[in-house]
Structures are given as C-alpha cells and as structure tokens.
Image (cartoon, grey):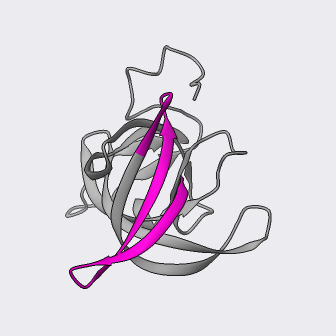
Amino acid sequence: MNGLRTLPVVGWRELVSLPELGLNDIPAKIDTGARTSSLQAIVIDDFLRDGERFVRFAVDWGGVRHQCEAVHVDIRGITSSNGDRQERFVIKTPLTIGNLTFRAEISLADRSQMQFPMLIGRTALRRRMVVDSGHSWLQSPAIADKGRIRR
C-alpha cells in the first residue's frame, strides 16, 4: 500500500475540544452511523453581523454555562436517533481530537437526554481518522484510567 498515509485511530468515545468556542475536553461519542456531528446546546438567537449570519447559543459544560457565538452556515433538517426530523442550526468551527485539528460542521441540538454532550459523525471523520469500536479514549490517554466521565 505504497503512497497511502496512516490515519490516526480513535476509539468509540474520545475527549474533543472546540477551541474557538472555548470548550475543552468534551466527552464525545464517535458515531459513523450519524452523518453530521452535533453538540448539546441551547440556541438563544440568530442575528446578522457585518452581513454574516451568526447564532448565539449556550453550552452547559463542567458546571459552567458557556455563552458562545459562531457563524452559522446552514439551518438543516436532521433526523435524530429516535427518527424525529428537526431543524437545526449548523456551525463550522475548528474541532480537535488528539493532535488533529480541523474545521467541522456541527449541528446544535438538544442532547440533554444523551450520555454524551457531543457526537462526532462520519463526515468529520472521513479521510482524517479511522474508528476502533472496541476501544475508548485512544486519543485521550489521560482519561483512559479515570473511569466514567460525569457532566
């Protein structure tokens, strides 16, 4: 397989960061069955700034409510895991997994009933990493021995 680069391997759950939003070490489920990544967020409003569309939202993480703003690239109809179709704001922001940082599309969703506040979908993973579904925290070694993450 000459000429093929070796892709980093991620487990089925990893810690991720969204550096432009000031959100670090978020437990995320890696889900190749989901097309779009999603983040637990409460949308406050959308607005125009200098001709660009923005969305203001809140993320409760680490016992703190983070107020965030980002350019929203779309409002998209997304089918949730329970089969309901929802209209969601989609932002594009840098996402860090291990030593790899790249821009990813992330929908803002009510994930309050889910175990993980973030889900990384296959579009973000494509051509960047491969998933070993039998392991966890492969790009998050500091967490591997700490057991279950609590919000």
Give whichever of 92, 42 is nearer the camera: 42
Chief secondary structure of the magenta portion: strand
Q: At 37% across and 53% down in the image, what residue appears?
A: 68
In the rendering, at what x and y percent does residue 23 appear? Answer: 36, 41
In the rendering, at what x and y percent does residue 92 appear? Answer: 35, 67
In the rendering, at what x and y percent does residue 91 appear? Answer: 40, 68
**Does 48 sit above or below residue 37?**
below
Q: At 54% across and 33% down in the image, what residue appears?
A: 135
In the displayed structure image, the side of residue 19 where residue 142 appears, left or right: right
In the rendering, at what x and y percent does residue 79 appear? Answer: 69, 73
Q: Residue furthest bottom?
A: 51
Q: Is residue 43 magenta?
A: yes
In the displayed structure image, the side of residue 129 where residue 107 appears, left or right: right
**Does 75 sit above or below residue 90?**
below
- In which image quadrant can residue 54 be found? bottom left
Q: At 54% across and 53% down in the image, what residue appears?
A: 41
- Does any portion of residue 6 appear in the rendered image? no
Quarter of the rendering occupied by the N terminus? bottom left
- Does any portion of residue 76 appear in the rendered image? yes
Q: Is residue 17 magenta?
A: no
Q: At 51% across and 80% down in the image, what residue appears?
A: 75
Quarter of the rendering occupied by the C terminus? top right
Give whichever of 42, 78 is nearer the camera: 42
Q: Which residues are magenta?
A: 39-66
